[in-house]
Amino acid sequence: MTAFTRRSGSDRPARMSLLAAAAVATLALAGCGSSDPLGGGSSASGSAGGESGSAAGGEGGAGDSIVVGSQQYYSNEIISELYAQALEAEGYSVDRQYQIGQREVYLPEVESGAIDVMPEYSGNLLQYYDKSATATTPEEVHAALTEVLPEGLRVLEAAEATDQDSYNVTQEFAEEHSLTSLADLQNVDEPLKVAANAEFETRPYGPEGLKETYGVEASVVPVEDSGRSVTVKALVDGDVQLADIYSADPSIESEGLVTLEDPENLILPQNVTPLVSDAIDEEAAAVINEVNAELTAEELIGLNRQSVEEQASSGDLAEEWLAEHDLV
């Protein structure tokens, strides 16, 4: 296990120079993770770029740097950058490994020790390790996670912010069929198609779960942009009747979409939860927990909106947000 050490006060980077420490690689988001996700840092932040560091190498990442990863999703990268800059402000060296794919790609890397910190979403992480999980509340989900994670991994404190999968319809479709919840879809007399990433097909809350829980049949139309503009367009244009969109995505409000209620808890709470390796000591964990303590659902939506509407990078967004909350 790598021991991470803080630099002395005179060696700590000034907040305004944090971004210069990272090599910038702005890429357009396209498809799933690369076949060699840790072969080199890559980054995309919605329609704006972010920061990424050099390649991770072996146990504990790059030397004595804390390796912070992110999913191939702009909102997750923003959260990663919040953690990264907060750690750097406390004197830790950070190696950024962003946009490295979906859970099936990056979790083996976390388990191997190549990634030390990964922002996760509690319910989905629980169901990855325990498909038969019965927890339903945020507290139950968090407690259950502590029992199922592989040796060497643990979760830190969950944020109030959530960013969970949700079934959405247009306002027009909701009014036409009197829809407010997933249960109401039983009354729709036309085939239902859901725009979502391909892996949605096998998720516990995908078509199989929808049928088992609500008696509703639906098929997946693969759209590989994690519920963003192409998915939203497919829904608004009427190519599909439903769309899986993350709940903190600003398009739900801007497009006037209706998120269907889930009274049977088909989709578990997805609170933002840091997944870390044993290499993260209590001091570093405390830094990350301070960030999560300030991250609300409204503020995450606001950060996402700035990324999408203002083309702001994850680095700039994190720098401003951390300063506003006196965390750097």
Image (cartoon, rainbow, N blue to C red):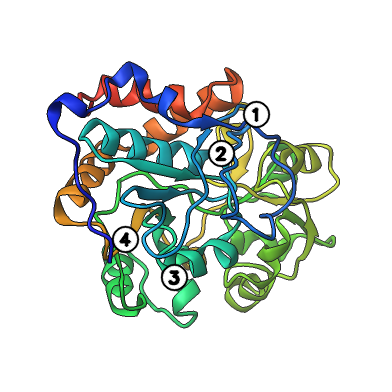
Q: Nearer the viewer, residue 60 or 291?
A: 60
Q: Which amino acid is tagged 3?
A: Ser
Picture layout, residue 99 above or below residue 115: above
* Image side of residue 64 versus residue 259, left or right: left
Q: Which mark is residue 112?
A: 3
Give the residue number, with chain letter if any, for mark 4.
138
Q: Which amino acid is tagged 1?
A: Ser
**Which mark sits nearer the N-terminus, 3 or 4?**
3
Residue 63 place in picture, x, y as percent: 36, 52
Q: Which amino acid is tagged 2?
A: Tyr
Q: Quadrant of residue 88?
A: top left
Q: Residues within 10 Å of mark 2 (few under 14, many from 20)?
A: many
Mark 3–mark 2 CB contact (< 8 Å): no
**Which mark sits nearer the N-terminus, 4 or 1?**
1
Separation of residues labelled 4 and 1 (CA atoms): 31 Å
Q: Nearer the viewer, mark 3 or mark 2?
A: 3
